[in-house]
Amino acid sequence: MPLITFTGFPCSGKSTWATKLIEALEQKIEHAKVDNGPGHNYNIKYHTDDSLGIARKSYRESVSERQARGNQISAVRRDLSRSTFVILDSLAYIKGFRYQLFCEAKGVSTPHCVVHVINSKETVKNWNSSVTNESHIWEEDLIDQLCMRYEEPIDSNRWDSPLFTIAASEEDEQLPIDEIWDTLVLKRPPPPNNATLVKPTSGNNFMQELEKQTSEVIGKILQHQQLSTIGGKVIIDRDNGVVIEMPATTVSIAQLQRIRRTYIGLNRMRSVASDRITPMFSDYVNRNLNSDD
């Protein structure tokens, strides 16, 4: 019945969490069968790029990528029914594609949700390098391209809502199975997304500090690029020796904002002392800019 769309960077852990979701849904269905409760007659259909015969290289060219998305849409359309969970485990990185999926679910009057598996580009590259199945390996330059093109889901968009966010690299991260079941089967409104919860730290509003300090770091980088030649060092905090080493190429505003949004997404669910936000984010920017070389 419901449609569950996974989205995230390549090799970000989507399939791992999709497998966990399938196992949890199967347990929920078995439990519902005891008293013929809601969801007792549901089954599960799971689609991945591999199961649909979509090669990694399909995302390199626009023509082959459109064909891949068409295959994904067709599989979803074929399996959507009143008693089937349809799980699409793919990049789903284009908001227009997620809107198409939303319309497919809406067209058969079935609920849907989006599961955003968050990870940094550095981490997904590291995970990709450890993959042993050659057909599952992403070419590194293609990872760079897809991360640059990625359009993050926003829970204020109706096609991205309800939105459940999973920080894949967090050891204690838990699958929000109860919230997903309640939303899709019991039709209860979801609780506030973990990624939007405000957490206090040292008497300050953590999210406000996170937004403010990361924005200031990006502002200093942009100012440096306006006043200096390519490369060099951006002094973020002279007193504490916080410096960002700029690459030998111009870094676009869009690229910097993507780095900032990813960092904020990764850190929304943790509390960090306010005086550590700037140095930690600067270190993160350094590592991402170096990995782009």
Image (spheres, rainbow, N blue to C red):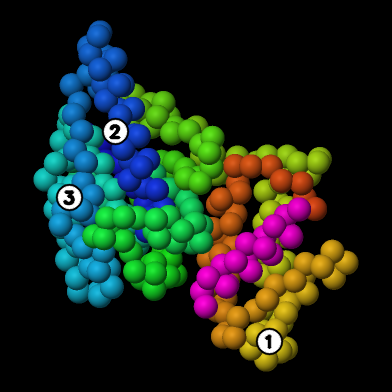
Marks 1 and 2, the one that precedes in the sequence: 2
Q: Is residue 157 left or right of residue 231?
A: left
Q: Residues under labels 3 and 2: Cα distance?
A: 16 Å
Q: In which quarter of the image is the N terminus?
A: top left
Which amino acid type is marked by label 3? Ser
Q: Which of marks 3 and 1 is in front?
A: 3
Q: Say which mark, if any, is on residue 266.
A: none
Q: Residues under labels 3 and 1: Cα distance?
A: 48 Å
Which amino acid type is marked by label 1? Gln
State the image quarter where residue 45 is shown: top left
Q: Which residue is drawn at 21% across and 46% down?
A: 47
- Res. 192 visible in picture: no
Percent of width and height locating residue 196: 57, 44
**Is 277 within the magenta?**
yes
Q: Write down the region rendered in magenta.
A: 276-293
Marks 3 and 2, the one that precedes in the sequence: 2
Residue that mark 3 sits on: 51
State the image quarter where residue 219 is shown: bottom right
Residue that mark 1 sits on: 226
Percent of width and height locating residue 143: 39, 67
Q: Which of 151 and 105 is in front in this view?
A: 151
